[in-house]
Image (spheres, rainbow, N blue to C red):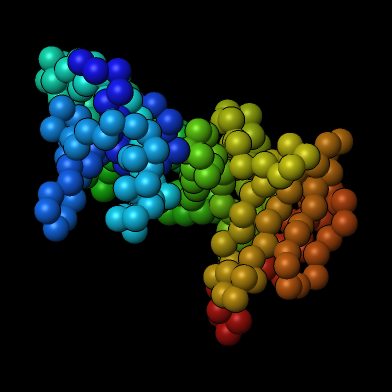
Amino acid sequence: MSKNNWIIVTRFHDDTEGLGFYTRVLSDVYEEIRDPRQATIFPTKKEATDWIKDNSSMAEYMKAEKLEPHVELFMEHLDGGMVRRSFPLLSKSPINFKYNKTKHDWKDVVDWSYNYRNSRDPDSLVSYEIYSSWPHLWRVTKHLWEFNGYWTLDYSELVVGVELVFPKNDSDFQNFKIELDYVLDNYDLTHKDDDGNIIFTVFDRFLSEGGNSVTLVKLPDDKWRVESRYSSKTGDVSLKEAFDYLVRERYYGDDDE
């Protein structure tokens, strides 16, 4: 195989190595193909690069690369069965069991909810029948609304946090502290600000309309802070002071209740 064989590789992600899509040039069109052995060969890198500039609207995703490494990778992929994806066995999943209201208390629901949301691919760990049997946190707790999770922009880290709620006519500080302490004592909450302080989002009557959201931030030395873009907020206060503020200003429920 000639050392001057260049092909055009298309990748739509940030991967700089591994298999991609390969370009096969026909008379009036070009094709994206999986087999690099069928790709159009260019004698030089410059000719391949010039072809990209002159003929493709996706030039930002295309690159001229040597053929040989891609053939080796493709043959390994072919010999391995050309695996597309792999999924865990439900029978091995630690959370694929039904909710039983006579057996499971609110802490069990919190545990299950956290373990589900903290999974890299939670929908592969439970069947829909199992998932639908478990109640939402807000049905079994007074101030925990739900666990939230999102990926960082490079998909390298799953960020997990808790959304709180403060019912207009049914909030209780002692109950709130019990639920909050349970979460803080048992889970690794990775939703944090730039200073490493844990952030709790709040589900309130404004429903974040127009960006009107609010967060409760856990600071060092048993201090807390309520932060919001568009409404008043607190300085560094005690948990009780933060609670009273949220119940008064950022409650959930209708004003005419």
Which quadrant of the view contains residue 171? Answer: bottom right
Q: Closer to the camera, 218 or 23?
A: 23
User: Which residue sits at x=64%, y=66%?
Assistant: 213
Q: Closer to the camera, 167 or 73?
A: 73
Q: Position of residue 157 (x, y in %)?
A: 52, 34
Q: Position of residue 120 (x, y in %)?
A: 39, 33
User: Which residue sits at x=64%, y=34%?
Assistant: 184
Q: Quadrant for the N terminus, please.
A: top left
Left or right of residue 70: residue 236: right
Vertically, is 225 above or below 111?
below
Q: Closer to the camera, 149 or 83?
A: 83
Residue 10 visible (yes or no) = yes
Which quadrant of the view contains residue 22? Answer: top left
Q: Position of residue 83 (x, y in %)?
A: 18, 25
Q: How many marks?
A: 0
User: Which residue sits at x=55%, y=70%?
Assistant: 207
Residue 97 visible (yes or no) = no
Left or right of residue 254: residue 233: right
Q: Quadrant for the C terminus, please.
A: bottom right
Vertically, is 171 above or below 38?
below
User: Which residue sits at x=76%, y=57%?
Assistant: 226
Vertically, is 73 above or below 61?
above
- Furthest toward the bottom, the residue is 256
Q: Position of residue 102 (x, y in %)?
A: 32, 37
Left or right of residue 16: residue 246: right
